[in-house]
Structure formats: structure tokens, C-alpha cells
Amino acid sequence: MEYYQHKVQYYETDTMKIVHHSNYIRWMEEARVAFLESIGWGYDRLEKDGVVSPVTAVECKYKVSTRFPEVIRIAVTVEEFKGVKLKLRYEMLNADDVVVFEGRSEHCFLDEKGNIVSLKRTYPELYEVFASLAAAQ
């Protein structure tokens, strides 16, 4: 499994020197962008093809506080894919392999007019990638 790495920045901490909770959602997005690029379907490619993939839901579970200047490794996996909706799972670990955060995000796929896109019909190659990654879980 490939991990995305994020080095905690000083500005991401609060007055207690702990990472502010809102940053974990940003890290989810960073890792998601890297994940899509790693499977050959980066946001730039999707948008060039006229597809956007908005977030429709986010779930977060904070396990252990993180601090500057830790390096956090983030694993992204396809938890579920049913052709229209994609559910991703995130696990963030510190240098001691302790899980510091677990999260999930849900996404759909829309065309430039805001209509739902059926990946199976319109982008069968991408559909197969997501379907195979979901089946592997």
C-alpha cells in the first residue's frame, strides 16, 4: 500500500501546539488528490474530460493528537463503489505506526452541467479501476 505523507506545519497547530481538527479534512483531500493521480485519474484529467467529483459526506474520528513537526502517513482505500457513488477510507498514522485519525468521504461524479455521470457508461476504464479497488477490500 502506498502512503501519502504530510509533514505537520506550524500554522496547522492551535495555541496548545496541537494540530487543529479542521486540518485533517484538508489532509484527506491532499491524500485523495495524490491517490487519484496514482491510479491515473487525477483531478486535472477528470476536469479536462468535463467531470467533477464533489464531496457529498465526510466522517472523522480523531484518535490521537498530532503536533508540529510530525510526519503523518495517510492511506487511502476505496471502501465502496456502486457506479455513481464512491466511498473512500482514510487512515492516518504517526511515525510510531499509531493510528491518529480515521476518516471517510463520499463522492459523486457530475458533468459540467451538474448532471450525475454514470462512469460505467461514460468512463468504463475509470469504472473498472474503482470497481476492482473496491473488490480488493
Image: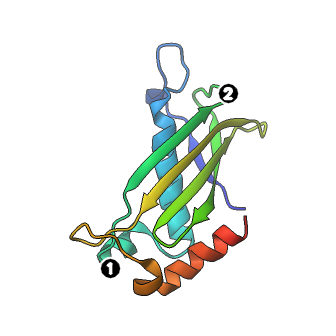
Q: Quadrant of residue 65?
A: top right
Is 104 left or right of 137, judged from the image as shown? left
Label 1 amino acid?
Answer: Asp
Label 2 residue SS: loop
Identify which residue is drawn at 67% across, 27% down.
64
Q: Quadrant of residue 79?
A: bottom right
The Cα atoms of the two marked residues, 2 and 1, are separated by 40 Å
**CB contact under 8 Å: marks 2 and 1:** no
Q: How many marks?
A: 2
Dot 1 crowding, Cα within 10 Å, few <14, some 14–19, many 20+: few
Q: Is residue 73 above or below residue 124?
A: above
- Sort mark 2 into few (<14), some (14-19) or many (20+) by Cα contacts within 10 Å: few
Q: Is residue 112 left or right of residue 68?
A: left
Q: Which residue is mark 1?
A: 49
Determine whether, in the image, residue 111 is placed left or right of residue 58.
left
Using the image as rendered, state which of residue 48 and residue 129 is in the foreground.
Answer: 129
The residue indicated by pointer 2 is 64
- The quarter of the rendered structure image containing the C terminus is bottom right
Task: Say which residue appears at 62% left-offset and 28% top-offset.
Answer: 66
**Residue 137 left/right relative to 21:** right
Disc 2 marks which amino acid? Val
Give the residue furthest to the top.
16
For the N terminus, the image quarter is bottom right
